[in-house]
Image (cartoon, rainbow, N blue to C red):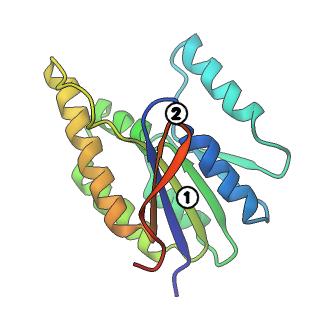
């Protein structure tokens, strides 16, 4: 028996992380925040610090820049409440490590499918802007878009945030 999975998408500063955190906190319990970001510069360190300051003492944090499917398996229990933020940074980490992103995406979807607790995943919707002008940026956009499609097909519920407003793309139970 599997639990429930929510996939939250949105553009930059759309409110997706805040929405995902509120949904996790409303579920009660002791949530685990799975952070995929790596702080390579002061700007990213500041972003991470702001996200950490938004979470209270009931949260624990696990940093997982690359091996996300195994981390989800390790956290997988019936009572688990896990928030992954964000899949877009995870794809970026994999791309820069020259990993097999398609394989990693399949492994992630399998981990989502077998997750027995409550799982919330956050990602940027990167396909609504202009076509990037360089090969690396296009490869990133394509990989993130493919992963978003796969995760959306796997998740029980999908919500898109635009201007802070949640738009249900896939209601739970469909």
Judge from the rendering whether residue 15 lies leftward or rightward of residue 105; answer left or right. Answer: right
Location of residue 49 by image quarter: top right
* Residue 135: image tag: none
| Residue at position x 30%, y 51% in the image | 147
Find the residue positioned furthest to the right.
57
Judge from the rendering whether residue 160 lies leftward or rightward of residue 46; answer left or right. Answer: left
Counting residues from the N terminus, which is met first, the one under dot 2 or under dot 1?
Answer: 2
- SS for tag 2? loop
- The residue closer to the viewer here, 155 or 76, is 155
- The residue closer to the viewer here, 163 or 96, is 163
Residue carrying label 2: 37
| Residue at position x 35%, y 61% in the image | 152
- The residue closer to the viewer here, 8 or 146, is 8
Relative height, residue 4 to residue 168 (above, below)? below
Residue carrying label 1: 120
- The residue closer to the viewer here, 45 or 74, is 45
Judge from the rendering whether residue 50 lies leftward or rightward of residue 170; answer left or right. Answer: right
């Amino acid at each position: 028996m599997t639990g429930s999975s929510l996939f939250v998408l949105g553009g930059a500063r759309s409110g997706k992380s805040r929405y995902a955190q509120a949904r996790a906190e409303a579920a009660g319990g002791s949530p685990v925040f799975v952070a995929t970001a790596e702080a390579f510069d002061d700007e990213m360190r500041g972003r991470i610090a702001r996200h950490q300051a938004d979470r209270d003492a009931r949260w624990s944090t696990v940093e997982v820049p690359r091996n996300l499917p195994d981390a989800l398996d390790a956290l997988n229990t019936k009572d688990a409440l896990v928030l992954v933020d964000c899949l877009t940074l995870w794809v970026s980490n994999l791309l820069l490590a020259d990993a097999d992103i398609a394989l990693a995406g399949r492994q992630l979807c399998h981990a989502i499918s077998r997750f027995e607790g409550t799982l919330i995943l956050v990602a940027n919707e990167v396909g609504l802007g202009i076509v990037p002008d360089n090969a690396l940026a296009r490869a990133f956009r394509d990989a993130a878009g493919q992963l978003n499609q796969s995760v959306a097909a796997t998740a029980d519920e999908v919500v898109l945030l635009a201007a802070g407003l949640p738009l249900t793309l896939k209601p739970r139970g469909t």
